[in-house]
């Protein structure tokens, strides 16, 4: 398969306070990102996501292992022009205006004045900052800074976009807009690698994910395969019952005003429940199957996170 990004046995340690002790932050990270996918890099706080991303962006050097992008070392200059990067905490010069920041970044990548005069307003609109380009960055809200950060990552039309927590600081509408933007990047044939804490967003977006725990990838793969298609439980809503004792294997979640919500964990019990409910004169309002979510998968991987 054509891999845009390949990380092999990446290791990084930091010295502790006053150089006492060594903190192994990345302990042999391996991952492969095929061309054209949206790839979610997930893990709890302190797992090493930003450290990995800084190595990919050439801001940190690993102690061992390597990151190859487009088949070359991530430190190769020719690779840098083909990558767009949004850091976790982007810092921009406060007195610069939004459009000036984009023009500045564009010039660094060698865009001509005529290319810039087209590209800058186009990008401002794409990230939802139309009409805000003349405002100084110190007057931007956190969400606006996140958007301008994304715009600067895209100014040179990169093939691979690396985003560290792109949804952070955004309200639900902003998150949806960024999700749509990430999907449109994929439609344009680009590869997107992003870290996130917001599992629901990752679940809606990602083709593939890696879950990083304590500097190691504990799960990697196609999201649908990792999640499986198995139903974990069903929630059944019944109407028209004043009293109801469910068969064993079911638990009543709520019982209010003649409406009962029952959770069932096997298909067999589901049939028994439905038969019993009908026999007692109930009407079945809904049967909702629940598959494993990315959150279930994630929680199962972190110590103390559940089953
Ligand atoms: N420059 C540094 N010096 C010392 N320790 C560091 C340095 N950078 C990161 N660390 C440590 O490395 C660990 C991993 O940090 P990192 O920022 O990569 O995690 P993360 O997965 O991005 O977490 P978060 O979800 O909170 O952003 C943390 O324990 C952090 O304290
Ligand atoms: Mg981080």
Image (cartoon, grey):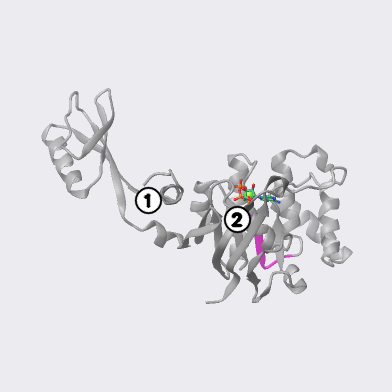
Give x and y (percent) for residue 80.
74, 68
Is residue 287 among what the camera can see?
Answer: no
Vertical order, 235 against 123 (above or below): above
Which residue lies at the image location 73% right of the left edge and 54% below the top edge?
151
Res 273 quadrant in image: top left
Q: Looking at the image, which is closer to me, 259 or 247?
A: 247
160 magenta-colored? yes
At horizontal 53% and vertical 58% (from top left) the residue drawn is: 216
Give the side of residue 138 with respect to residue 44, left or right: right
- Asked if 82 appears above or below 139 in the picture, the reply is below
Q: Secondary structure at mark 2?
A: strand
Q: Which residue is mark 1?
A: 292
Provide the residue span drawn in magenta.
157-164
Asked where in the image residue 154 lies, by quadrant, the reply is: bottom right
Residue 298 falls left or right of residue 3: left
Report crowding for label 1: few under 14, some 14 to 19, many 20 or more residues within 10 A (C-alpha): some
| Residue nearer the viewer, 151 or 228 | 228
- Bin the neighbour count of mark 2 within 10 Å (Cα to Cα): few under 14, some 14-19, many 20 and up: some
**Residue behind mark 2:** 24
Q: Is mark 2 within 8 Å of ligand 1?
A: no
| Label 1 SS | loop
Residue 199 falls inside the magenta stretch: no
């Amino acid at each position: 398969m054509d891999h845009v990004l390949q990380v092999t046995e990446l290791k990084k340690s930091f010295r502790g306070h006053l150089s006492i002790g060594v903190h192994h932050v990345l302990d042999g990270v391996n991952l492969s990102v095929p061309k054209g996918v949206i790839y979610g890099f997930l893990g709890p706080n302190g797992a090493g996501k930003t450290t990995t991303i800084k190595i990919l962006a050439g801001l940190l050097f690993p102690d061992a292992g390597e990151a190859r992008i487009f088949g070359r070392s991530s430190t190769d200059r020719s690779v840098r022009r083909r990558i767009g990067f949004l850091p976790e905490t982007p810092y921009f010069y406060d007195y610069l205006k939004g459009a000036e920041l984009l023009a500045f970044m564009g010039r660094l990548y060698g865009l001509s004045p005529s290319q810039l005069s087209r590209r800058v307003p186009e990008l401002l609109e794409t990230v939802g900052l139309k009409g805000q380009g003349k405002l100084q960055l110190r007057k931007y809200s956190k969400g606006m800074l996140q958007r301008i950060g994304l715009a600067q990552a895209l100014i040179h039309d990169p093939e691979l976009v690396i985003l560290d927590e792109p949804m952070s600081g955004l309200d639900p509408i902003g998150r949806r807009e960024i999700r749509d933007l990430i999907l449109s990047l994929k439609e344009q044939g680009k590869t997107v690698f992003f870290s996130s804490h917001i599992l629901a967003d990752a679940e809606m977006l990602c083709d593939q994910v890696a879950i990083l725990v304590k500097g190691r990838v504990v799960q990697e793969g196609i999201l649908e395969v990792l999640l499986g298609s198995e139903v974990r439980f069903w929630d059944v809503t019944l109407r028209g019952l004043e009293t109801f004792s469910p068969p064993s294997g079911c638990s009543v979640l709520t019982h209010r005003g003649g409406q009962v919500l029952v959770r069932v964990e096997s298909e067999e019990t589901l049939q028994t429940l439905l038969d019993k409910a009908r026999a007692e004169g109930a009407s079945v309002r809904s049967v909702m199957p629940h598959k494993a979510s990315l959150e279930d998968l994630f929680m199962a991987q972190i110590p103390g996170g559940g089953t």
